[in-house]
Image: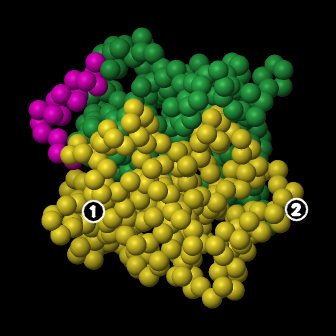
Chain colours: A green, B yellow
Amino acid sequence: MKILWVFAHPDRRSLGGSLMTEGLRTLESLGHEHRTSDLYGMGWKAVVDADDFTDDFGGPPRDRRLFVGSEQERAYRERKLSEDVRREQEKIDWADTLVFQFPLWWFGPPAILKGWFDRVLVQGFGFGVKGPEGRTLRYGDGGLAGKRALVVTSVGARESGFGPRGIHGQLDQVLFPLLHGTFWYTGMAALPPFVVYGADRLTDAGYAHSAGRLRQRLRALPGTDPLPFHEENGGAYDEDLVLRPELAPGLSGLGVHS
Amino acid sequence: MKILWVFAHPDRRSLGGSLMTEGLRTLESLGHEHRTSDLYGMGWKAVVDADDFTDDFGGPPRDRRLFVGSEQERAYRERKLSEDVRREQEKIDWADTLVFQFPLWWFGPPAILKGWFDRVLVQGFGFGVKGPEGRTLRYGDGGLAGKRALVVTSVGARESGFGPRGIHGQLDQVLFPLLHGTFWYTGMAALPPFVVYGADRLTDAGYAHSAGRLRQRLRALPGTDPLPFHEENGGAYDEDLVLRPELAPGLSGLGVHS
C-alpha cells in the first residue's frame, strides 16, 4: 500500500503522536510506503481565503467577489492554487490509502484538519468530475475513487456514550460528515474508524493495549471491508436523490444510507 | 434579545454576507441589541496552539507537553487565555442568543468557525462545570445554559437531498455535532436551523424569498421552540450514558436523542 498519513495534533509528544509513530513503524515493517502530512508541524494554513490563489486572488486589490467553489475549481484547472494545496493534492494522487488521525474536538476534526478538506479537496479534483454520460460522479465514485480512507481518533469519553443509543451519538453517525460526506462523496471507501476511548485517562497498560490494537488494525487493513454505503449512481436513489422506498423501508435518518 | 452573530465567510459581498446585513437590520428594527464576530474580517486565528496561552505556552522554549483540554481549563481559570479568545468569551457572556452563519463546507462549518469552537468553548467556561451534587453539567445544562443558538447556513444542494432519506443525510442529523454536540452539550438550546438550499443557483427572486424567510424567522425567534433533545441529568440516560430502553424503544442512531 501507499499510505498518506495526515496528522492533526499540536504536539507530537501527545498520545496521538505516539500512536502515529507506532503506526508508521508498523507500516514500514509490513513493507508499505508512506508519506505524512503533520499539519501543525507543517504550519498548515487552516482557512480558505484569497491567498489560496496565486493569481488575481493572491494579493490586493481584491475587487472581485470570491465565489469559493467556482474559484477553487478554476484555479485547480489553471494550476493557480497555492503551492501548499497542490503539494497535498500530489500526495493524495500518489496514495491509495489515506489515514486521518486527530483527537475528536467538538465531535469532529480540529479546525486545522477541517481546513485541509476545505482547501485541498476542491471541485474538479476531489469532486465535480463528470462520468461518461455526463453524470456527476459522487458517493462511491468521483475524483478519489479507488482510494480508501481510515479515521484514527481519540476521545475522552467512554465507549458506551458513543454506542447505538449513547448520549454522544452513535460514532459512525457522528462522523457521517467525514465518512460519508467527505470520503464517500469524493469516491473513497470509508473504513471503519479506529477509536481510542477514555483517552484522557489512559494508563500505560491502556496505551500498550491501544497501540497493539492499532498495529493489528493496520496489518489487517488490506483485507478490511469498508462501510457499505450506497452508491449515488448504483440505483439506490431516485432523481431527487432520495433513497428508494424499497431500501430500509419506513426508516429515516443517517442509518438508512448503508 | 442580546444577539451575538458569528459570521464565517471570506467575502462580505457573498450571499451569506447579504443575508447577515439583512438579519442585523431586522434585529435592529425589532429593538434587539446585537454584536458581531465576522471571523474572516477579524483575522480570527483558526487553530488551537501554544499561542492561545499568554504564559508558558506563549513562546519558545516550549518544553512542556501541550495537554490541550487541561491547559485550556487552567489558562481560563488563571485568565491566561489569549486576548482574542477572552474577547469572544465576553461576548458570549453578554449574549442570550447566538447566531452562527456559514456556508456548509464538507457538511460542516468552515475551518475558521470550527476553530472558534475549538478555541473559545474551553473547559471551565463552555463545559466541565460542576452542579450542586458534584454532577458534571452537560447536555441541556452547563456553562452556557439559558442561552439559545441558531444556525443560519447555505448549501449548494437541493432540499430533497437533505431530507429524512436524502442522500446527503437528514440535515439536523448531519449537523448533530454542532446542534447536539456543541450547543446542547454546553447547555444552549439549539433552535431549528435556518437553511438556504440551492445557494449556488439562487436567482434574484430566490434571494428575495430567502431574505424574507430570514426576516420572518428572526421576528419569530423569541417564541421559537428549540429542538427537543433529552437532558443528560433529566433521567433519560443510565449510568453508562445510554438512553433508557423505555425511550425510543428498539431504535438506535442519532434520532433517538430527541
Residue B202 in sight in this render? yes
Residue B254 or B55: which is nearer the viewer?
B254
Dividing the picture into quadrants, the one containing residue A127 is top right
Residue picked out by circle 2? B204
Residue projecting furthest to the bottom: B31
Coordinates of residue A129 in the picture (x, y in percent): 74, 30
| CA distance separating discs 1 and 2 | 46 Å
The residue sitting at 42% across, 26% down in the picture is A192
Question: Between disc 1 and disc 2, whose residue precedes?
Answer: 1
Q: Amino acid at mark 1?
A: Leu
Which mark identifies residue B137?
1
Residue B49 in sight in this render? no
Coordinates of residue B211 in the picture (x, y in percent): 76, 67
Residue projecting furthest to the top: A223
Coordinates of residue B57 in the picture (x, y in percent): 27, 64
Chain on which label 2 sits = B
Quick one: quadrant of the N terminus of chain B? bottom right
Indicate left or right for B76 with B13 as reference.
left
Magenta segment: A200-216
Name the chief secondary structure element in magenta: helix
The residue sitting at 70% across, 81% down in the picture is B25
The residue sitting at 71% across, 32% down in the picture is A241
Label 2 SS = helix
Residue B121 or B192: which is nearer the viewer?
B192
Indicate left or right for A115 with B12 as reference.
left
Residue projecting furthest to the front: B246
Q: Residues within 10 Å of mark 1 (few under 14, many from 20)?
A: many
Residue B210 or B45: which is nearer the viewer?
B210
Indicate left or right for B105 with A227 as reference.
right
Label 1 SS = loop
Indicate left or right for A198 with B197 as reference.
left
